[in-house]
Image (cartoon, helix red, strand yellow):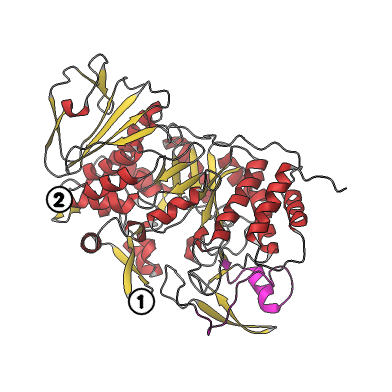
Amino acid sequence: MANALSPLKQKLSQQLSFIYQDVALAQSYDDIAQELLEVMALTENIEMPEPHTNNWSQRDICLITYGDSIMRDGEAPLHTLKRFLDNNVSEVINSVHILPFFPYSSDDGFSVIDYSSVNEALGSWQDIKDISSSYHLMSDLVINHCSSRSAWFSHFIEGQGEGSDFFFTTEPENNLSDVVRPRTSPLLKEVDTANGKAFVWCTFSHDQVDFDFRNPAVLKAFVSIIKQYLDAGVKIFRLDAIAFLWKVVGTSCINLPQTHEVVRLLRTLIEAAQPDAIIITETNIPNTQNLTYFGNANEAHGIYNFSLPPLLLNTLLTGNCLYLKRWLMSMPPAQDGTMYFNFIASHDGIGLRPAEGLLNEHELEQLTSTVADFGGKVSWRTTESGTQKAYELNISLFDALQGTIKGKDQWNFERFICAHSIMFALEGMPGLYIHSLLGTQNDYKKLANTHHNRSINRHRWQEGLLNEALDDENVHHQKVLTAITNLLKIRINQPAFHPNATQFTLHLGLQLFGFWRQSQNRMQSIFCVSNISDQTMTLPLSELNLIVTESWFELISNTEITNLTEQMELSPYQTVWICNTSAA
């Protein structure tokens, strides 16, 4: 009688059987599972971590940055970055997402040529390990596609070698009308290969050729990459564009069941190798679809909260929190073992697809035109009906908040800090873009050089110029850095700001946006209220139902509230965090 499979190997075999149920394989599921275990250097009898474990707390704040966002002549940018982190934010930032740091051919790193190397223009694996020794390191796993200049794709063209069967092809006459994608370029790329003409699937661009995960060798290659990244100190894996992974001709080719099962399988392997490692899925899709990547707390540990940026921007530009409040009330609490990854700015633009069904067409058009008036750009996609629709707003967040739908005004700084005070208090882990931390503005020079809209918010600072800006009291950069780090110093000491602490939406009208957080031990409560308008507003404390037998403090100003029946005046875009314990 054959030996019974270990629980881990049995789980992997079951997951593989679901993924490849419609694929004819040369190997058994058990054999593939064994190979995956060997690639990850795992023994079959390894103990799996307890489910529903939160490997994060209110102290986890992630800075999102390119490896060369800050540069110094004659020095590896990753080394420069670490010095900036150590000198400026090490007290409040414990995690760093370094955007793709591999050799690439386009898309600022997301067209990877070689997954196993560090881009020499940035530094070395030693620089990566130096950062991961001081901070939780998040790395992209660009798993849907790679560069057309990669060795794998060269082998595909040559018809031999690793990669020769890694890429998804189909015929142009097949029915591809239901395919959902975020770009207007042709889906298929015609390529002459040693085996004849082929039409390669390109979800994003013709330099980004999509993998064919129907071939288990592709899965094995990425498991090997994951193992290398774990050994280099990576703790958080960002699964880039994961929603498009599995393709079936004749379907939408997005969010297919096999894609979800691949995420579950990767979680099984990663958790077995490092129980406190985290998977975050990057799925810039409508809100209800995004939520499915939690699975039953067995898929992604975290999901990007893609609806937050457009809804919060709309709130602050209109002075009306109706849509943001409706959305917040509808969001399910993240189960233990899962969390929302909150962000309001990133290296990409502000996606509008996650606002579909949440903002009406008038709101979306008004948002788009206001951002354009403030110097931003708009990226478009082709809909299923063949029409053009705004897909993404490209602008630095500081410039996006320089006014309202009425035009520019004097509240740019206050509105910008208000946006962050809301994000830092919400349920979930905050992801802070480095150019928000520094209050960086639109980079029109880079935009003109690249002709890519996203370049407008991908500025590269020279370290000397950045230091001068941070030392100059006449510009806003130091003011922004100080205000944001002060908010984070408060946040990281409040148990009620744990990513999984209770959250309820408050009803305070349309100009005051508020919610209540309670620590998991129910000992601490924080009422977070922001004036999201350009007018002074009055907050009657009686509407918060503050318990009279407790002492209450406003954490941001660190002042005690002595009269619970008084009305609190909130200046335009002022936020208060009212708590039953004083700031630590």
* Circle 1/circle 2 CB separation < 8 Å: no
**Which secondary structure, mark 2?**
loop
> Which residue: 26% across, 21% down?
553
Q: Quadrant of residue 411?
A: top left
Q: Give the side of residue 179 with respect to residue 261, left or right.
A: left
> Which residue: 33% across, 51% down?
309
At label 1, which amino acid type do we have?
Ser
- In the rendered view, tell whether residue 67 sits above or below residue 526: below
User: Which of the numbered marks, if any, corresponds to residue 409?
Assistant: 2
- In the rendered view, tell whether residue 363 sits above or below residue 437: below
Residue 4 lies within the magenta run: no
Q: Residues within 10 Å of mark 1 (few under 14, many from 20)?
A: few
User: Which residue is tagged 1?
Assistant: 385
Residue 403 position within the rendered picture, expressed as x and y whole percent measured from the top left: 18, 52
Quadrant the C terminus occupies: top left
Q: Nearer the viewer, residue 180 or 497?
A: 180
Q: What span is colored magenta in the figure?
A: 146-175
Residue 199 position within the rendered picture, expressed as x and y whole percent measured from the top left: 57, 80
Q: Quadrant of residue 566?
A: top left
Which numbered mark, 1 or 2, is in the foreground of this view?
A: 1
Using the rendered image of the protein, determine whether residue 98 is visible from the camera's viewpoint.
no
At label 2, which amino acid type do we have?
Asp
> Which residue: 50% across, 70% down?
203
